[in-house]
């Protein structure tokens, strides 16, 4: 079980996730009860739902490096509390052939992360890269600990003319949790 938590501290800098603004102007802006994310062409607004401190086991994902991506990484996550419970009965649950795999799959969520600054963004990209390397090498699972806030997507607009894209973009992010 200790291997499951080996890299849980990988994202300890997550405290800064949505609480601080990077001094060079990069990263989201906190405006009262909202977090504003700007890309090359878009401005997205998220409601702040409350503080979060959570650890996850990763089961896949991608870093979101596209110029108009609203997030820095999107990951398939299983809360550590669920992983620990499944592990008690099925220690190999992370393997597709394990009888515990369907239980883990049902509890896995698609989670999108927004780093508050360059360091947090790089940590997210590193977590994705580490997960990929470990899967290819049949190595340990990668875990991630996040401290910050849960968010809800409120609106997405084109910066140039104010066109509202919330409906279209919202459908693409439906069912996703944001931190």
Image (tube, rainbow, N blue to C red):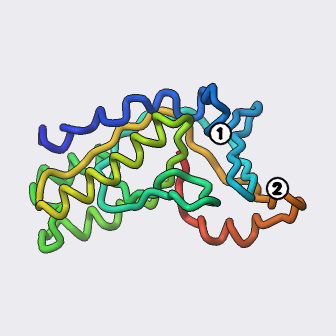
Look at 78% across and 67% down and name the residue there. 165
Q: Nearer the viewer, mark 2 or mark 1?
A: 2
Residue 29 shown left or right of residue 101 in the figure: right
Q: Which quadrant of the figure has residue 122?
A: top left
Look at 27% across and 37% down and name the residue there. 8
Q: Position of residue 72 (x, y in %)?
A: 51, 51
Residue 26 shown left or right of residue 9 in the figure: right
Q: Nearer the viewer, residue 29 or 67?
A: 67
In the rendered image, the quadrant that contains the N terminus is: top left
Q: Nearer the viewer, residue 153 or 20?
A: 20
User: Callout 1: helix, strand or loop?
Assistant: loop
Vertical placement of residue 47 versus 69, above or below = above
Look at 63% across and 25% down and name the residue there. 23
Q: Position of residue 96 (x, y in %)?
A: 17, 72
Q: Earlier in the sequence, mark 2 or mark 1?
A: 1
Q: Position of residue 58 (x, y in %)?
A: 30, 54
Tag 1 residue: 28
The count of marks equals 2
The image's mark for residue 159 is: 2
Q: Nearer the viewer, residue 40 or 121?
A: 40
Rate crowding at label 2 as few (under 14), some (14 to 19) or many (20 or more) other CA atoms within 10 Å.
Answer: some
Q: Position of residue 169 (x, y in %)?
A: 68, 67
User: Callout 2: helix, strand or loop?
Assistant: loop
Rate crowding at label 1 as few (under 14), some (14 to 19) or many (20 or more) other CA atoms within 10 Å.
Answer: many
Vertical placement of residue 121 versus 154, above or below = above
């Amino acid at each position: 079980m200790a291997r499951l938590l080996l890299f849980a501290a990988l994202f300890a800098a997550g405290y800064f996730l949505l609480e601080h603004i990077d001094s060079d102007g990069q990263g989201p802006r906190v405006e009262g009860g909202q977090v504003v994310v700007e890309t090359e062409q878009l401005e997205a607004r998220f409601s702040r739902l409350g503080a979060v401190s959570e650890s996850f086991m990763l089961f896949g994902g991608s870093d979101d490096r596209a110029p108009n991506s609203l997030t820095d990484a999107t990951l398939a996550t299983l809360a550590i509390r669920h992983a620990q419970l499944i592990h008690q009965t099925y220690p190999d649950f992370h393997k597709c052939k394990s009888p515990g795999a369907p239980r883990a799959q049902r509890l896995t969520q698609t989670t999108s992360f927004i780093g508050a600054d360059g360091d947090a963004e790089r940590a997210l990209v590193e977590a994705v890269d580490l997960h990929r390397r470990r899967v290819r090498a049949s190595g340990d699972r990668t875990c991630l600990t996040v401290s910050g806030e849960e968010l809800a997507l409120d609106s997405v607009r084109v910066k140039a003319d104010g066109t509202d894209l919330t409906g279209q973009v919202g459908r693409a992010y439906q069912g996703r949790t944001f931190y």
